[in-house]
Amino acid sequence: MSAPSILFFDAKSYDREFFQAANGNFGYELTFLGHRLTGESARLAEGHDAVCAFVNDRLSPEVADTLADSGIGLVALRCAGYNNVDLRSFFGRIHVVRVPAYSPHAVAEHTLALILSLNRKTHRAYYRTRDGNFAIEGLLGFDMAGKTAGVVGTGSIGRCAAQLLRGFGMEVLAFDVNPDLEWAERSGVTYVDMGELYRRSHLITLHCPLTSDNHHMINADTIGQMRDGVMIINTGRGGLIDAPALTEALKDRKVGAAGLDVYEEEDQYFFEDFSVRGLDDDVLARLLTFPNVLITSHQAFFTREALTNIADTTLGNIRDYFEGRPLENEICYRCCDEGCRKEEKGRCFESGPESAPPSE
Ligand code: NAI
């Protein structure tokens, strides 16, 4: 019997490198496509056994139909977030697995890189000194020690970030819909409500998933509750921030700095080169003009360790599927909306048309 064939969408050179290296232990047939997964490109899955997708692939109902018609029973996400998947339309037909944690350190450390650059303006100093300009006017920062940081979402990444911020001598306030009081006490972190976090924090960093409840949680109203000159960092998901409202607050100097690794409309631009063509997105273009805004292209995860873990876990998830084992990293709308029920079965549903998704 030939090895299962996995089709990768939106694959870059680093995906090939790390997945081919990890595949030495698995022996699958890997095919890498540069195209994003869309209603159109989903047809290319015909003849393959599973599909591997990334953050900006759109796993819409149309894609679910096309993949199911092509006999695909598994989509393996090579990322943690799954806000790009219409889980209801996959349920009962196509299992969806993800990599829940691959290196919280990678994302938390990038968060600190954004904070430190924006605070001490190293991104600007770099260009000045290369141009022979050794003046330091305009590069004034602040001591982080003694200031207050607000961490929204204290899962694996938020905890790492909180620990790093504590290491700088900051007071750390946190908010999570499921607070872990024991961890907070051990780590010297204080849970507060969002109002207090907004009111007291000198910098606010977002580490929660994007859900239907927190879309645009950072908006004109919540920015109005924050300290003047607050620094806002987002390595979570773009949709957590109303970007036009952030732009206005930067223009009014209400927000002192913003570090964004994610952007709501990022799927049009991130991971691609638009340096010659230019941008059509006026909000992104305006954000890029502020000296106190630092945008990175969804690269917080991008370390060797993280890519190695992503490849190992993704191929391990695929092996579990083909070998009929429980799918530890499976997600479905029930896991996500109602708490997981798969413990008894080992999988979120038994494959087959009889388990079609209930209509809403
Ligand atoms: P996690 O699942 O370990 O933690 C998420 C935490 O957020 C949980 O404690 C949960 O209770 C909390 N939460 C959920 N809804 C919330 C809300 N409305 N308000 C406050 N807290 C809420 O996830 P992890 O691994 O820490 O990742 C967090 C997010 O970071 C992911 O959902 C993903 O969107 C983003 N991410 C970004 C990456 C990047 O490269 N920029 C890479 C990996 C993840």
Image: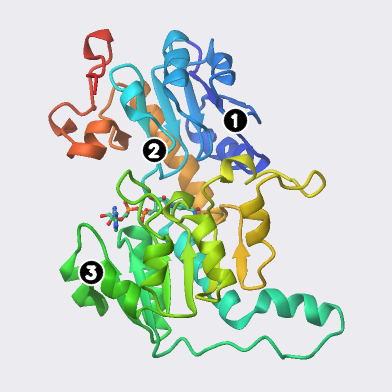
Q: Residues within 10 Å of mark 1 (few under 14, many from 20)?
A: many
Q: Which mark is residue 36?
A: 1
Q: Residues within 10 Å of mark 3 (few under 14, many from 20)?
A: few
C-alpha separation, residue under disc 3 versus residue under disc 1: 39 Å
C-alpha separation, residue under disc 2 versus residue under disc 3: 30 Å
Q: Quadrant of the C terminus?
A: top left
| Comparing labels 3 and 1, the label whose residue is closer to the camera | 3
Residue 117 quadrant = bottom right
Name which residue lies at 59% across and 70% down: 251
Work out whether 73 lies above or below 329.
above
Mark 3 lies on a secondary structure that is: loop
Amino acid type of disc 3? Asp
Mark 1 lies on a secondary structure that is: loop
| Comparing labels 2 and 3, the label whose residue is closer to the camera | 3
User: Which residue lies under the disc numbered 2?
Assistant: 98
State which tag comes first along the sequence, 2 or 1: 1
Asked whether, in this view, residue 312 is left or right of residue 126, the answer is: left
Q: Residues within 10 Å of mark 2 (few under 14, many from 20)?
A: many
Q: Are marks 3 and 1 in contact (CB under 8 Å)?
A: no
Tell which residue pokes out farthest to the left in this image: 344
Mark 2 lies on a secondary structure that is: loop
Amino acid type of disc 2? Arg
Q: Position of residue 325 (x, y in %)?
A: 27, 26
Name which residue lies at 24% across and 27% down: 347
Name which residue lies at 43% across and 89% down: 145
Amino acid type of disc 1? Arg
User: Which residue lies under the disc numbered 3?
Assistant: 193
Residue 159 quadrant = bottom left
Mark 1 within 8 Å of ligand 1, using the beta carbon: no
Q: Position of residue 298 (x, y in %)?
A: 56, 52
State which tag comes first along the sequence, 3 or 1: 1
C-alpha separation, residue under disc 2 versus residue under disc 1: 17 Å
